[in-house]
Image (tube, rainbow, N blue to C red):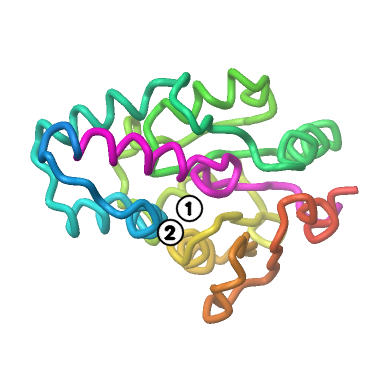
Amino acid sequence: MDLQNFIWDFDGMLFDSYPHITEAFMQAYKRIHQTDIDRQQCYDLFKKSFRTAYDFYQPSALCKLLFRAIESRTDLAPAVLPYPGIPEILKKIHENGGKNFLNTHRDSLALTYLAQHDLLIYFTDAITSEINTMPSKPAPDTNLYLIKKYNLAPEKTVMIGDRDVDIDSGTSAGIKTCLFDEFRNADHIACDYRVYDTRDLAKALGVE
């Protein structure tokens, strides 16, 4: 295994969470603003970033609070579940002596989901929005912090995510990058590795 250090994004990469996020926001927006919104459009906007969705919908402060409350309900359908193959590759990396790291814009709820599925034990460290005072992705700062803290060899380190901000943060940090192009619509994003199915990650990244 040439790669030894794996820095993961959470939403849309480790876990299929955007359908859950979309449902939570639609419920909150309808309750506070008394307006129905298009599900696919909402999904697409949140997929880009929370900021993009907020800029478009301009939810009130109360709506944001309600959204976060609804979204944090782990019993809200559709459930937030790991993508196929993710538990296996995280475990395999750990067993092979590699290191998994989390680098997400998400708050500590990401850790809750990982723990619920017995996956948190495979992570060496996690950077979430609640503890991160550094510039967020696409800035390289969080990746550079992990590289320095754990003395990671850049040539053996990869940033893995589903959006351009993930890939840009890895490239700017001088590490390898892997894009999960789930919908085959990101050909414009340059990366070192590309997969269309998370079950292909192990082979693509040499985790056998």
Q: As rendered, which of 101 and 38 lies closer to the eye? A: 38
User: Residue at 62% of width from left, 60% of height from top?
Assistant: 180
Label for residue 25? none
Position of residue 104 relative to residue 185, above or below, is above
Position of residue 184 relative to residue 165, above or below, is below
Queried whether the magenta region covers residue 182, the answer comes back as no
| Magenta extent | 1-29
Q: As rendered, which of 185 and 194 lies closer to the eye? A: 185
- Quarter of the view holding residue 162: bottom right
Residue that label 2 marks = 140
Residue that label 1 marks = 144
The number of discs equals 2
Could you tell me if the residues under marks 1 and 2 are in contact, i.e. CB atoms within 8 Å?
A: yes
Residue 4 spot, x, y in % from top left: 75, 48
Position of residue 7 relative to residue 61, above or below, is below
Left or right, residue 196 beside residue 186: right
Q: Secondary structure at mark 1?
A: helix
Q: What amino acid is found at the position of numbered circle 1 in the picture? A: Leu
- Quarter of the view holding residue 123: top right
Left or right, residue 29 beside residue 98: left
Left or right, residue 61 beside residue 115: left
User: Residue at 60% of width from left, 42% of height from top?
Assistant: 14
Q: Secondary structure at mark 2?
A: loop
